[in-house]
Amino acid sequence: MKKKFLLFILVFYSLISYAEAQLILEFSAKHNASHIALDSIYIKNVTKSCDTMLYFPDSILEIQTNVGINTNQPVNNNFLSQNYPNPFGEETSFSVFLQKNDFVTISIFDVLGRELTNYKSSLSAGTHLFTFYAGSENYYFVNVTTSQRKEGLKILHINNGIEPDCKLVYKGISYNSKERKSTKSTFIINTGDQLMYIGYSTITGGICGSDIITDSPLTSTNYLFQITNGVPCPGTPFVTDIDGNVYNTVQIGNQCWMKENLKVTKYNDSTEIPYPGTDITSWYAAVTTGAYAWYNDDSTYKNTYGALYNWNAVGSGKLCPPGWHVPTNTELLTLVSYLGGGSVAGGKMKETDTVHWNSPNTAANDSLGFSALPAGLRVPGGTYDDIGNYGRWWTSSPGTTWAWYWRLEYNTAILYDVGGNDKRFGQSVRCIKN
């Protein structure tokens, strides 16, 4: 009796040491409230700096997270999926993928090597689904054999079986366009790791769109991308300022831009930027010092529109995060040229709505994802104006008492490259990567 008990303990710990928890991550996408297909999904483990990709029609990723003693077990490939759930109660499921028609044998054994049930049949190419119903055993081994390969699973049953005998039921072939991909052995994840997902889709008219989601999944999760125009900068999908604000990026030609207006309240050396607030005299007097404001001195405008900076904050050279800068007028002209000239560039840059932009928001299509918004301005006298009508952005190119800026308007497709503005104006800032 003691020997049997010791054998049981050894088998138990052997199985636990190789047990893997499984996460199933499923992805879908919407654009303007309509579901659209995902061309590809980039998945990065930010904590461990490893990544993988899903390509259409794949939209489900199986990840084995090692939770036992042995943390170096290889992950199953597409041929035989890990069962889910595992450990399981009364039933668990797995799939077998065949690249061509083949004869399949599935045998299930107990810890003593006795075959408890099996399935044998010729199956067509595709993904075939099976459900296993446990008997009174706690530990099972699944072997799947075809003419091309042979693989196995270790599965854990955590409840006492009601029926003495187990059974294996074929559930048919999957015709779902969402196929499952198991991670490569080089993609590693442990509980608590931060993952970043970037979904890419082709929107109506052939425009490329994307969305970014970050999460630390503890259980299987469904994610919904809200696709907007434009694609993130390769290797730099987002950037964080010294306040901790996170900005998505967008690649336009050879330039990498922030996708939102800057809203930082400190220079990148941690020095506070002066905030005059409702003190009009202090704002007007900020001739040689930097300053920022929230439109109408209301911080609820921050997240959508960003801050309004006078040019002296720009001229400090410390406004953008390290590795980024306020664009020069020459860099702006490069953007204008890529967009087809100033007469059409504005429409290609403006966000396509009349929620932020006043109607008619002429020619707005935001085709490359710059998503410009009309944040208005603060005038040297300290008052605010033009939110909804105009968006104005500083460049880093100065004159003597003025500096170059550029302007978009609600009723035209033109991007105006304006000769200059008083440095005491408060205007928006977009940063460009060095």
Image: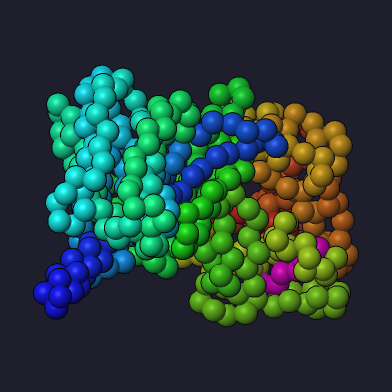
| Residue located 26% across and 41% down the image | 117
Q: How many numbered badges does the structure rendering display?
A: 0
Q: Does 228 appear above or below 161?
A: above
Q: Name the spot of residue 247 as percent of width and height, x first.
A: 57, 57
Q: Where is residue 376 in the image (x, y as percent from the top left)?
A: 80, 54
259 sits left or right of 26 in the view? right
Q: Residue at x 77, y 39 (%)?
A: 353
Where does the image place residue 88, in percent across and percent down from the top left?
Answer: 39, 57
Nearest the eye: 342 or 22: 22
Asked whether residue 293 is drawn in magenta, I would say: yes
Figure quadrant of residue 357: top right
Whole-percent x and y of residue 369? 60, 40
Q: Compared to 379, does 364 lie above or below? A: above
**Highlighted magenta segment, given as a residue range:** 290-295
* Relative depth, front residue between 89 and 43: 89
Q: Residue drawn at (29%, 22%), measured in percent from left and top?
A: 123
Residue that appears at 58% across and 45% down: 224
- Which of 81 and 116 lies nearest the eye of the viewer? 116
Give the vertical position of 23 relative to 382 (above or below). above
- Horizontal side of 277 relative to 337 (left or right) equals right
**Quadrant (top left, top right, bottom left, bottom right) of the C terminus:** bottom left
Colour mode of the rendering? rainbow
Quarter holding the N terminus is bottom left
Q: Residue furthest left?
A: 3
Can residue 111 be seen in this snapshot?
yes
**For residue 28, above or below residue 122:** below
Q: Based on the picture, tell me whether residue 3 belongs to the magenta stretch.
A: no
Q: Is residue 39 visible?
A: no
In the foreground, 240 or 257? 240
